[in-house]
Image (tube, helix red, strand yellow):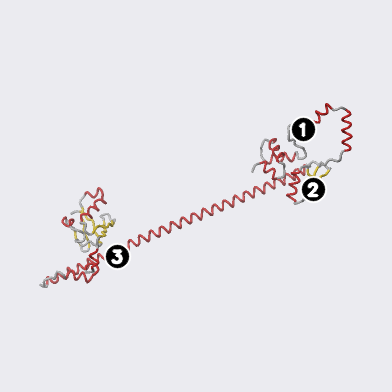
Amino acid sequence: MSDIQTLQDMGFAKEKAERALEVTGNKGVEAAMEWLLAHADEDIPMGSGSSSSISAAGGNEASSDDKTETAASAEDAPPVAKSLKCDECGKLFKSQDEVEFHAAKTQHSSFSESTEEKKPLTEEEKKAQLALLEEKMKRKRLEREENDKREAQERERLRIKSGKDMLEAKRKMEEQEMKKIMDQRRREKQEEKAARDRVRAQIEADKAARKAKQAGESPSPAAPVAAQVTVAPAVTSSPASKTYTNARIQIRMMDGTTLVETFDAKEQLAAVRLFVQLKLGEAGTSSFGLMTNFPKKVFASDDYDVPLDKLGLVPSAVLIVTKAP
């Protein structure tokens, strides 16, 4: 809000406010207000010429008879209104702006012209009016500070709410990611268990064959298969076992890390070796080997040309990277 508008809100006319700011060098509302109170009873000239100067110029040309006639006509003229009076409280006002300000403040609505001249304000009245204006400015300043405080509190509330929403969204994302990891680990454990079951079945079949051989019986070629069917029918005897086209290989590196990759069931073991060599980078230039734990078998150079399904690595298996002997 401009200084002129502030002075107008206090009840001063726009022309007087502009004049007060000009005289005080635009030093602010308080300086202009003090000047207006000090010159409240003075008429502020609004133009370059004044009625007094025009009268003076005409007086040089008028004769003494004209002056006599003018004085006589002035005595016969009706009384001139010198102020405006509030019929409800009796206060006198010099301008229409003062009347409008008084009406807005007191809700008085009855005013009339008066021949009484408004007396100049005493020093006590000026101080009292100045104190009232300062109190009004203080209230407006407090209201503005209170509004600024409420707006700052609202901005802080919105900032905290936005932060909480972001944290909640981040927590949900982390929960979803953790659930995915747990599901993946559960599937890997199930696959490892299935692989161990197949290995145990093969071991039992090998034991049965050795016992039969030691007893002098000719081992039946179908015996290992039968044993395997008994332990893991879904792998050997079920028609669905022949439909596996992929092999999911879990590779345990020498540094303890684990890699998981899916290969075609008809790919050779050399493809797995090449995959490991690419993952090792420069370290992969040195020789290394592959082996299984159940049953324990170290693959020889001839095994790398054999397809994965022929080596019993379908549909899933665990391979361990070892140092070359």
Task: Quickly name the residue at label 2.
Answer: 111
- Mark 3 or 2, nearer chain start: 2
Q: Residue furthest left?
A: 216
Hey, what amino acid is under mark 2?
A: Phe
What is the spatial separation of the Cα atoms under label 1 and label 3, in whole angstroms?
108 Å
Q: Position of residue 206 (x, y in %)?
A: 17, 68
Q: Where residue 229 is drawn, which disc sits there?
A: none
Task: Quickly name the residue at label 1.
Answer: 50
Q: Position of residue 132 (x, y in %)?
A: 72, 47
Mark 2, secondary structure of its residue? strand
Residue at 89%, 38% in the rendered image: 76
Q: Is residue 236 left or right of residue 107?
A: left
Hey, what amino acid is under mark 3?
A: Gln
Residue at 79%, 41% in the rendered image: 120
Mark 3, secondary structure of its residue? helix
Between 42 and 149, the residue placed more toward the observer is: 42
How crowded pointer 1 is (Cα within 10 Å; few <14, some 14-19, many 20+) is rated as: few
Mark 1, secondary structure of its residue? loop
- Mark 1 or 3, nearer chain start: 1
